[in-house]
Image: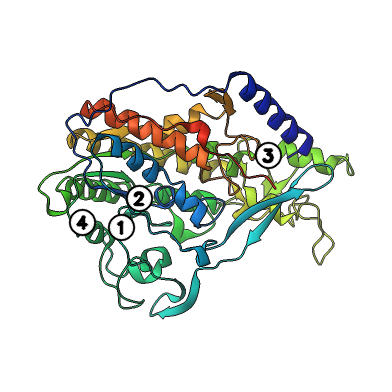
């Protein structure tokens, strides 16, 4: 990423913002329509929790999209909304990535902020050692658990192996036995958002398809579990009935994690000193090492690893010879990318169908994310999927900035209003930042 480009982009945004940044907020008379927002709960994974910059920390939690929605719902009778915040002494939470400067002349310098909320570890038979975060014991409306897959929601042991879930439960690992779906339904609610399923394909994609255990969840099992989840949620945790909104799975391949490091960019850098180099060799998921093509995806961590061209013990430069190819963990090859697209499409067909069958509002997050690939103007500011300069995605290249979460919150609100005849006001996106600069 060229710093001059970044700063020019920032300047361009600032100029546009100064000239035309005027919130596009229409005056509406708030109304709840046919919905009841008196107790809203949010069910989901890292996106629901406010995860950003490679970690869960207080600033991200305070800018989660469910909290934004709940705040807007309070204009139409919505109740209080409790998020399991890390306290001030644990504000850095699990740790996260921070932009601390730029190298000369180009790349961003990204530093890892250490965790503050880890209080120890536990040994779970069959799983090994897992970290423990400081417990949260207050009221709870945001049930977002980073890392959770749909095929985890009925597991009795999951609260022992996911530290983000464990911190919400009363017991200490390995003594937790409450499945996630039971946990979120343990208290009555009137309205819910559910954004589950992303991690059923995301882990495979971000790991370059290199870990067999990360392979996407079986399609039939996904359909079975999504029907179970939606059918359970509409019962309102014992309230009798609840309305809700669900979102499908975003197009992960359009995020900066997969679009920032390209074959052309790698060759451009290496050819400055070695103009004879014409190929970058990769280790695909199956078969022998081969030259990469534009249909293969290099992953963002390859940039941070800074290994291209460095010789191994035999003196063979990394990535420039088939005997020392770019490792599979840094590449989602063409065939693996096709698997990601296939499973995402299948899951999304299920989510849309189940939403319709249960009368739920539906957010086409996949279409929303794709629409920002080339950039859109939001209240006078240009927002795109470009890494750092785009304002939409945080430093991990997958999760959103506060501005990105505000955009998502508005998509949820628009879908809720359309489905239930309500007039919940949308969020003023201009109040939220993109990537935080040093």
Q: Secondary structure at mark 1?
A: loop
| Image coloring type | rainbow
Residue 264: x and y in percent read 73, 36
User: Which residue in the protein does label 3 denote?
Assistant: 262
- In the image shown, does 52 or 323 lie closer to the viewer? 52
Q: Residues within 10 Å of mark 1 (few under 14, many from 20)?
A: some
First along the sequence among labels 1 and 2? 2
Residue at 56% across / 66% down in the picture?
Answer: 115
Q: Are marks 1 and 2 in contact (CB under 8 Å)?
A: no
Instruction: Give the Cα distance between marks 4 and 3.
Output: 44 Å
Q: Are marks 4 and 1 in contact (CB under 8 Å)?
A: no
**Res 350 → quadrant:** top left
Instruction: Give the Cα distance between marks 1 and 2.
Output: 14 Å
Q: Secondary structure at mark 2?
A: strand
* 102 left or right of 196 in image: right
User: Which residue in the protein does label 4 denote?
Assistant: 185
User: Which residue in the protein does label 2 denote?
Assistant: 44
Residue 416: x and y in percent read 28, 32
Instruction: Work out whether 318 lies above or below 129.
Output: above
Q: Residues within 10 Å of mark 2 (few under 14, many from 20)?
A: many
- Residue 278 in sight here: no
Residue 417: x and y in percent read 28, 28
Residue at 64% across / 23% down in the picture?
Answer: 18
Disc marking residue 140: 1
Instruction: Work out whether 173 lies above or below 381.
Output: below
């Amino acid at each position: 990423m060229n710093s001059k480009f970044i700063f020019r982009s920032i300047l361009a945004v600032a100029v546009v913002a100064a000239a035309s940044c005027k919130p596009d907020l229409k005056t509406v008379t708030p109304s709840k329509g046919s919905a009841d927002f008196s107790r809203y709960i949010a069910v989901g994974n890292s996106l629901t929790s406010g995860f950003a910059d490679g970690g869960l920390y207080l600033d991200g939690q305070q800018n989660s999209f469910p909290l934004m929605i709940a705040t807007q719902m309070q204009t139409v009778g919505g109740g209080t909304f409790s998020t399991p915040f890390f306290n001030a002494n644990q504000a850095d939470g699990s740790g996260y990535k921070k932009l601390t400067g730029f190298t000369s002349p180009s790349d961003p310098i990204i530093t890892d902020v250490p965790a503050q909320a880890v209080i120890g570890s536990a040994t779970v038979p069959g799983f090994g050692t897992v970290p423990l975060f400081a417990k949260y014991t207050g009221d709870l409306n945001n049930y977002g658990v980073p890392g959770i897959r749909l095929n985890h929601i009925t597991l009795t042991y999951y609260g022992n192996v996911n530290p983000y879930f464990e911190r919400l439960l009363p017991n200490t690992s390995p003594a937790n036995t409450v499945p996630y779906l039971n946990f979120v339904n343990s208290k009555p609610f009137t309205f819910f958002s559910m954004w589950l399923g992303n991690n059923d394909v995301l882990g495979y994609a971000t790991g370059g398809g290199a870990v067999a255990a990360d392979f996407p969840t079986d399609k039939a099992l996904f359909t079975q579990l999504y029907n179970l989840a939606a059918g359970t949620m509409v019962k309102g945790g014992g309230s009798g009935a609840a309305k809700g909104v669900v979102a499908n799975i975003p197009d992960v391949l359009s995020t900066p994690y997969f679009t920032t490091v390209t074959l052309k960019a790698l060759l451009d850098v290496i050819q400055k000193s070695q103009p004879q180099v014409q190929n970058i060799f990769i280790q695909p998921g199956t078969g022998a090492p081969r030259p990469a093509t534009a249909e293969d995806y290099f992953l963002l961590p390859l940039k941070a690893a800074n290994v291209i061209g460095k010789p191994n013990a035999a003196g063979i430069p990394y990535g420039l010879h088939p005997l020392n190819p770019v490792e599979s963990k840094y590449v989602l090859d063409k065939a693996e990318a096709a698997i990601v697209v296939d499973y995402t499409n299948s899951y999304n067909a299920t989510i849309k169908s189940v939403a319709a069958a249960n009368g739920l509002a539906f957010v086409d997050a996949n279409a929303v994310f794709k629409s920002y690939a080339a950039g859109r103007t939001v209240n006078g500011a240009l927002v795109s999927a470009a890494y750092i300069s785009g304002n939409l995605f945080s430093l991990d290249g997958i999760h959103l900035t506060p501005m990105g979460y505000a955009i998502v919150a508005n998509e949820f609100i628009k879908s809720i209003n359309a489905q239930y005849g309500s007039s919940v006001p949308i969020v003023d996106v201009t109040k939220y930042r993109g990537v935080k600069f040093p």
